[in-house]
Image: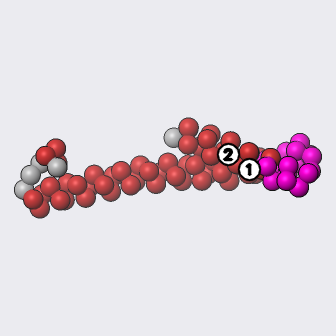
């Protein structure tokens, strides 16, 4: 989970630095903007991690349902 959050946060920082670089503005002028970008992208990383976990649970349930309909165990699928 932490790798997703930190990775997305660092991507947000890089996106913010790229944005300011394109505009040819001082990269270290407004640190609050960097923190905001990192927070927003970090939250997106948290959401992506939670979605990945939930999707795994849904797939597990669906595989169990399919196995029950076929009359086999989940391992045999």
Residue 11: which disc? 2
Label 2: how many residues lie within 10 Å, few (<14), some (14-19) or many (20+)? some
Q: Residue at x 25, y 58 (%)?
A: 62
Q: In the rendered image, which quarter is residue 61 located in?
A: bottom left
The number of callouts visible is: 2
Q: Residue at x 62, y 46 (%)?
A: 8
Q: Which residues are magenta?
A: 18-34
Q: Looking at this view, name the residue that lies furthest to the left.
A: 71
Q: Is residue 62 visible?
A: yes
In the image, taking residue 36 as reference, residue 48 lies left or right, namely: left
**Callout 2: SS:** helix
Q: In the rendered image, which quarter is residue 7 located in?
A: top right
- The percent coordinates of residue 16 (x first, y second) are 78, 50
Q: Is residue 29 magenta?
A: yes
**Callout 1: SS:** helix
Q: Is residue 51 magenta?
A: no
Residue 41: which disc? none
Label 1: how many residues lie within 10 Å, few (<14), some (14-19) or many (20+)? some
- The percent coordinates of residue 68 (x first, y second) are 12, 57
On the image, numbered disc 1 is attached to which residue? 15
In the image, taking residue 77 as reference, residue 25 lies left or right, namely: right
In the image, taking residue 5 as reference, residue 31 lies left or right, namely: right
- The percent coordinates of residue 51 (x first, y second) are 46, 54
User: Do callouts 2 and 1 mark residues in contact (Cβ within 8 Å)?
Assistant: yes
Q: Residue at x 9, y 52 (%)?
A: 72
In the image, taking residue 37 as reference, residue 20 lies left or right, namely: right
- The percent coordinates of residue 27 (x first, y second) are 88, 44
Q: Looking at this view, name the residue that lies furthest to the top.
A: 3
The Cα–Cα distance between marks 2 and 1, rounded to whole angstroms, is 6 Å
């Amino acid at each position: 989970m932490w790798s997703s959050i930190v990775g997305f946060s660092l991507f947000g920082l890089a996106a913010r630095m790229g944005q300011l670089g394109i505009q040819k503005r001082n990269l270290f002028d407004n640190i609050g903007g960097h923190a905001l970008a990192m927070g927003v992208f970090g939250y997106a990383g948290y959401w992506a991690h939670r979605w990945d976990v939930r999707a795994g649970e849904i797939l597990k349930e669906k595989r169990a349902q399919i196995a029950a309909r076929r009359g086999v165990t989940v391992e045999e699928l």
